[in-house]
């Protein structure tokens, strides 16, 4: 097995699935001003709000940034092609999604989006997502257990992160019905 290079990248390419109003992008640029960001969302209104919020401003620390917001349906559109046009195909450092995968449909749709996410990452690239978990007292057809999320990740081809002990189970215990998942390509 080859060694994965985990050296921090000074100008990482970050993709956010269901980016909404761009709050994660803003936080990312404050921490890593040289980051490059591409956010996908279905809502044209949220995307326009994100574009306005992150528009270059000479008085802002966010003046020199590479940011792209695109309206896509993560299940039905070819969002990998958007990344290819940016020159990011297979070069993405991180794919992130917060509380959004459950809105994409069932196991098949969510696994497909995870599989497509894996394809855009470079070797050693990282997927990080948090989502609502299935609760027995409140069943929902597109929310799943920690074990089902882990199976989706395995089916999508992601390798478990061995550096941390069962991140998803710890997050579920700490945050209740919200699970956090982290995997490397």
Image (tube, rainbow, N blue to C red):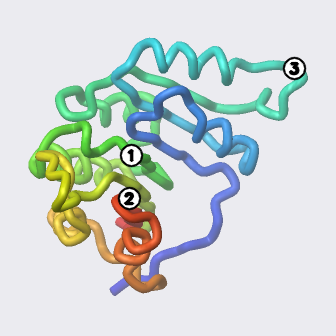
- Residue 120 % position (x, y): 35, 48
Q: Dot 1: few (<14), some (14–19), or many (≥20) neighbours within 10 Å?
A: some
Left or right of 133? Residue 123 is right
Query: Which quadrant of the view contains residue 134?
Result: bottom left
For residue 128, side relative to residue 112 (left or right): right
Depth check: 167 or 123 in front? 167
Name the residue tied to disc 3: 58
Q: CA distance from mark 1 to mark 2?
A: 8 Å
- Residue 6 in sight: yes
- Judging from the image, what secondary structure is the residue with disc 1 in? loop
Classify 10 Å Cα crowding around label 2: few (below 14), some (14-19), many (20 and above): some
Task: Look at mark 2 in the image and give the residue it sits on.
Answer: 178
x, y (%) of residue 18?
Answer: 39, 35
Query: Which residue carries the number 1 mark?
Result: 99
Please indicate, yes or no, whether residue 156 appears anywhere in the rendered image: no
In the rendered image, the vertical position of residue 175 relative to residue 78, given as above or below: below
Q: Where the N terminus falls, by quadrant?
A: bottom left
Q: Nearer the viewer, mark 1 or mark 2?
A: 2
Q: Which residue is found at the position 64% from the left and 31% from the top?
A: 66
Q: Earlier along the polypeptide chain: callout 3 or callout 2?
A: 3
């Amino acid at each position: 097995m080859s060694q994965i290079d985990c050296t921090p990248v000074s100008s990482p390419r970050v993709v956010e699935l269901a980016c909404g109003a761009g709050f994660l992008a803003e936080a990312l640029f404050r921490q890593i001003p040289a980051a490059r960001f591409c956010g996908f969302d279905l809502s044209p209104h949220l995307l326009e709000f994100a574009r306005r919020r992150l528009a270059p401003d000479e008085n802002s620390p966010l003046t020199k940034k590479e940011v792209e917001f695109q309206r896509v349906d993560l299940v039905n559109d070819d969002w990998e092609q958007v990344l290819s046009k940016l020159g990011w195909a297979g070069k993405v450092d991180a794919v992130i999604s917060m509380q959004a995968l459950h809105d994409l449909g069932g196991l098949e749709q969510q696994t497909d989006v995870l599989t497509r996410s894996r394809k855009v990452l470079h070797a050693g690239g990282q997927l990080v997502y948090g989502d609502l978990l299935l609760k027995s007292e409140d069943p929902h057809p597109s929310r799943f257990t920690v074990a089902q999320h882990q199976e989706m990740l395995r089916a999508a081809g992601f390798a478990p992160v061995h550096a941390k002990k069962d991140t998803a189970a710890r997050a579920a215990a700490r945050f209740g019905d919200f699970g956090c998942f982290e995997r490397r390509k």
